Image (cartoon, rainbow, N blue to C red):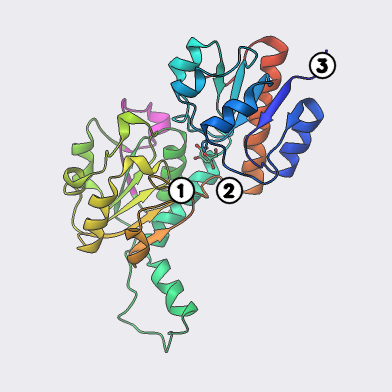
Amino acid sequence: MPQPRLLVTRKLPDAVEVRARRDYDAVFNPEDRLYGPEELIRLTQDVDAVLTCSTERWTPELIEQLPARLRIIASFSVGYEHFDLPALRGHGIVASNTPDVLTEATADVAMLCLLGAARRAWESQLLLRERRWERPKMAELLGLELRGRVLGIVGMGRIGQALAQRARGFGLAIHYHNRRPLPAENAQGATYHDTLEGLLPRCNFLSLNGPGGAETRHLINERTLALLPEGAVLVNTSRGTLVDDEALLSALRSRRLFAAGLDVFDGEPAIHPGYYELPNCFLLPHIGSATVETRDAMGFRALDNLDAFFATGRAPDALN
Ligand code: 8YV
């Protein structure tokens, strides 16, 4: 049996590419260019499978033009809002993601964002790097203590729960909003709110850990931001689309919010320029899953899905 032909759309860690090259007739993207829809249509014409990232959007218009030969698109990501699942299903193409393997790394970065925002890490970095640190000042660069405050988590899935576990160690009380309350063994004493409106007024810190997509677009907007207590901190490591940038920037400028810690942005990497101007933003370039172990595990999980699909016709992490 000839090896299935696989298009790998982005440059992936070496160990992942070595395995893909061993088991597939694989085509890579060594320059790590970002493919637009036309290029994707051209490059997929002679492949059986694609290993994609969340940087490629699989829209109905694009899916319409994929060849009958293409049977599976495995994503190197847990998020899957870049897939139009009904359109893929309609074309008999299986889509899969990589759940579980990036939970801990992403929860670590959520904690980093929370601490970076609360303790004014960016302003402190600037003071040093611009050689402006004259002497320790007792009444400057004062941040927020975590102990005894409340962290609200929107979206208490795997990553939300892993963040809650970390945050408890810092003395934060956990409240959360989810479609459904968690079983007691997963909630670990966290307080459930059945509405976002019920949760927000309780939160000194708010972390967004829900999925992207149309349903959650601009969940955090002028109205919902106004429900947070004065001086709250917003953390986002899920998807930038959850936040209305103009509303957040205005709350940060007026200091109604103390700070924000953001790893994801609407339209990234072309983020809203307003963020660059504000000292009370701790900004990271979407590095939630960026550890050696996790990025390898994501690639291996995507390949596991492809292997199982070609061996049995079923991908364990199939989404459709
Ligand atoms: C990835 C992510 O870096 O897995 C996800 O959903 O957001 C990130 O971990 C990125 O999406 C790679 O495709």
Q: Residue 290 shows which numbered tag?
A: 2
Mark 1 / mark 3, whichever is N-terminal: 3
Q: Is residue 301 left or right of residue 176?
A: right
* Proximity of marks 1 and 3: CB atoms separated by less than 8 Å: no
Q: How far is mark 1 from mark 2, CA to CA?
A: 18 Å
Q: Residue 2 shows which numbered tag?
A: 3
* Quarter holding residue 19: top right
Is label 2 in a helix, a strand or a loop? loop
Mark 2 vs ligand 1: CB below 8 Å: yes
Disc 2 packing (10 Å; few <14; some 14–19; many ≥20): some
Q: How far is mark 1 from mark 3, CA to CA?
A: 47 Å
Viewer-nearest of discs 3 and 2: 3
Q: Amino acid at mark 2?
A: Ala
Mark 3 / mark 2, whichever is N-terminal: 3
Between 207 and 30, the residue placed more toward the observer is 30
Instruction: Write the start and end of the magenta stretch as one range.
Output: 173-190
